Amino acid sequence: MAQPRQATWYRWDDLPKEAVNPSLSRRLITGDRVMLAHVYLKKGCIVPKHAHENEQFTYILDGALRFLLGEDGRQEVVVRAGEVLHVPSNVPHEAHALEDTLDVDVFSPPREDWLNKTDAYLRRK
């Protein structure tokens, strides 16, 4: 018989902060089927256009991000503190930090490219 799984407790400030590039850093919490990330973006940071199989929720805690959505980037959405953007699987998107921003990103399934550090689109600069 399999052993019961244990709950795990985290404190954001105790987790390592990874500097991905000079204007973006993050902290990650990963479960079996979901990933939670604190993403810290400096004003002017641009997350280049990309897409992934992972469903994504972006919840802005502080600051604001302007998203350009779709293959042509014509759909523009500004997401501010207290607001959430849902990005379905495989929808191209990019983000521009309008202010210093802290967001919580939720991914399902977890982002393997973030875990194994093959997210080259973020590591430029």
Image (tube, rainbow, N blue to C red):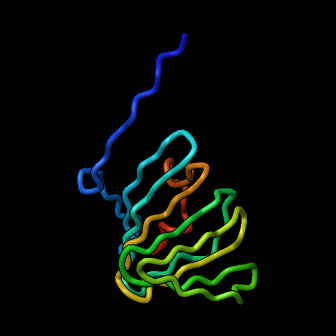
5 horizontally vs 108: left or right = left
* Residue at position x 39%, y 76% in the image: 41
- Name the image quarter holding the C terminus: bottom left
Indicate the position of residue 42 as horizontal and vertical percent values. Answer: 36, 80
Q: Is residue 109 left or right of residue 11?
A: right
Instruction: Please identify the residue farthest to the right as the structure is shown.
Output: 71
In the image, residue 60 above or below residue 31: below
The residue at the far left in this view is 14
Q: Is residue 111 visible?
A: yes
Most foreground residue, 2 or 52: 2
Please determine whether, in this image, residue 52 is positioned above or below residue 100.
Answer: above
> Which residue reaches farthest top?
1
Residue 56: x %, y % from top left: 59, 63
Give above or below for 95 relative to 3. Answer: below
Taking the spot 52% from the left edge, 69% from the top edge, the residue there is: 58
Q: How many marks?
A: 0
Residue depicted at x 71% and y 70%: 91
Residue 23 visible in the picture: no
Image location of residue 22, percent across then percent down: 35, 74
- Residue at 38% from the left image edge and 87% from the top image edge: 99
Picture quadrant where residue 17 is located = bottom left
- Position of residue 3 relative to residue 75, above or below, is above
> Where is residue 11 shown, x and y percent of the image?
27, 51
